[in-house]
């Protein structure tokens, strides 16, 4: 179910069966983990679980485990920890962003209120900690280190770049902390609990961080370029909310830029200035929102973002080249190709 939703193809039927079985086990354990005897808490905590999602982090855990013994039960528990942590951050993020929609439905803060959303996120963090306690001190420490990076990333996103700092470098650093760190941990958890050798675990972790940032950049591009809801939200949502994603930051920087093949991109100075004016504030006006989307889609900024995406994907591929030649490596390569292909 999850692999099909992501569009990941498997050349090895045995690997596909094993991964699907692992993800089914994660899904079942995830629902059990967020359940509460209190009906209201159960409904709030299960809200985003039932809304679906790509389960990207559990997929990384399960695939990384296939470099060792993927049948170990701790692999599933660790994958659940990562997904619960991710879900908890979504409840908190939507409050901070004042978001109204999450995964095509009302956000939890819009359905209930900010206090309920924040406390539900806290409840999920507590459930993740309860599972971690059974996984041992090493897992607790890694989760604490990961959570520190998540919080630092959120703080840095909130305060913005320091005076004189490059906004794009700042943004990519935020993505590494807010997104890459947890995906890297998902890969490390899966490999560690499958008994994989330490050098391979380290490389899988590196892969997870690079592909995690790439995946978020691809979502940024989809928010601009997609005519559908491939990213799980209405195209242009970030623009409407005034969230400065990577294409917007490139547009605000200005300049003609260069593409992946080294060719010059051209756009009139008038259009470029108009685009910078539009994206410098939340676009609540429908006409301005549509104009900004059209300008961004034809601007150098979207191609510059694609070039940055390919850079992260290339680094992820380079890491894969150092891994043992097993079917799971080919699946991770297919996942890397998908992250690029989904942006068109």
Image (cartoon, helix red, strand yellow):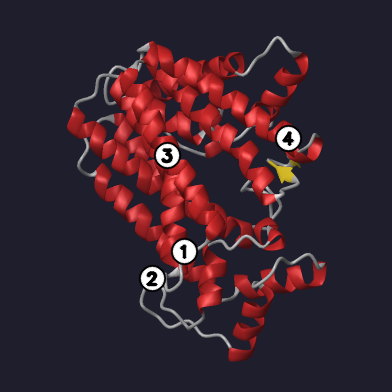
Secondary structure category for the residue under label 4: helix
Q: Residues within 10 Å of mark 4 (few under 14, many from 20)?
A: few
Q: Which mark is residue 306?
A: 1
**Residue assigned mark 4:** 115
Q: Which mark is residue 270?
A: none
Mark 2 and mark 1 in contact? Answer it, CB < 8 Å.
yes
Give the quadrant of the N terminus. Answer: top right
Where residue 196 appears, x then y in whole percent?
A: 24, 24
Q: Earlier in the sequence, mark 1 or mark 4?
A: 4
Q: Residue at x 52, y 55 (%)?
A: 157
**Residue assigned mark 3:** 148
Residues under labels 4 and 2: Cα distance?
46 Å
Q: Quadrant of residue 195?
A: top left
**Residue assigned mark 2:** 260
Q: Residue at x 48, y 81 (%)?
A: 265
Comparing labels 4 and 2, the label whose residue is closer to the camera: 4
Residues under labels 4 and 3: Cα distance?
23 Å
Residues under labels 1 and 3: Cα distance?
29 Å
Number of numbered discs overlaid on the protein picture:
4
Secondary structure category for the residue under label 3: helix
Where residue 109 appears, x then y in whole percent?
A: 74, 39
Mark 4 and mark 3 in contact? Answer it, CB < 8 Å.
no
Q: Earlier in the sequence, mark 4 or mark 2?
A: 4
Comparing labels 1 and 3, the label whose residue is closer to the camera: 3
Q: Residue at x 61, y 70 (%)?
A: 297
Residues under labels 2 and 1: Cα distance?
8 Å
């Amino acid at each position: 179910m999850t692999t099909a939703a992501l569009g990941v193809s498997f050349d090895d039927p045995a690997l596909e069966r094993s991964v699907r079985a692992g993800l089914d086990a994660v899904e079942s354990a995830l629902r059990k983990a967020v359940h509460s005897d209190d009906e209201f808490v159960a409904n709030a905590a299960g809200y985003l679980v039932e809304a679906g999602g790509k389960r990207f982090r559990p997929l990384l855990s399960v695939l990384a485990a296939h470099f060792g013994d993927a049948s170990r039960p701790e692999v599933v528990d660790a994958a659940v920890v990562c997904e619960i942590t991710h879900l908890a951050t979504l409840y908190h993020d939507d409050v901070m962003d004042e978001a109204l929609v999450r995964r095509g439905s009302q956000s939890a803060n819009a359905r209930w209120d900010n206090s309920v959303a924040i406390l539900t996120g806290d409840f999920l963090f507590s459930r993740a900690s309860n599972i971690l306690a059974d996984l041992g001190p090493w897992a607790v420490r890694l989760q604490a280190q990961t959570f520190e990076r998540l919080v630092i990333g959120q703080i840095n996103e909130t305060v913005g770049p320091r005076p004189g700092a490059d906004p794009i470098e700042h943004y990519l650093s935020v993505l590494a902390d807010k997104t890459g760190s947890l995906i890297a941990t998902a890969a490390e958890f899966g490999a560690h609990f499958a008994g994989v050798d330490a050098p391979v675990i380290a490389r899988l972790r590196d892969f997870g961080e690079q592909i995690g940032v790439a995946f978020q950049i691809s979502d940024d591009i989809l928010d601009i370029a997609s005519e559908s809801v491939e990213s799980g939200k209405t195209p242009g949502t970030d623009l409407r909310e005034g969230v400065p994603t990577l294409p917007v930051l490139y547009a605000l920087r200005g300049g003609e830029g260069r593409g992946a093949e080294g060719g010059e991109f051209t756009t009139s100075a008038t259009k470029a200035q108009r685009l910078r004016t539009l994206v410098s504030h939340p676009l609540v006006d429908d006409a301005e929102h549509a104009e900004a989307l059209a300008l961004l889609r034809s601007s150098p900024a979207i191609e510059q973002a694609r070039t940055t995406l390919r850079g992260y994907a290339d680094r992820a591929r380079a890491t894969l080249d150092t891994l043992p030649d097993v079917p799971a490596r080919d699946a991770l390569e297919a996942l890397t190709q998908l992250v690029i292909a989904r942006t068109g």
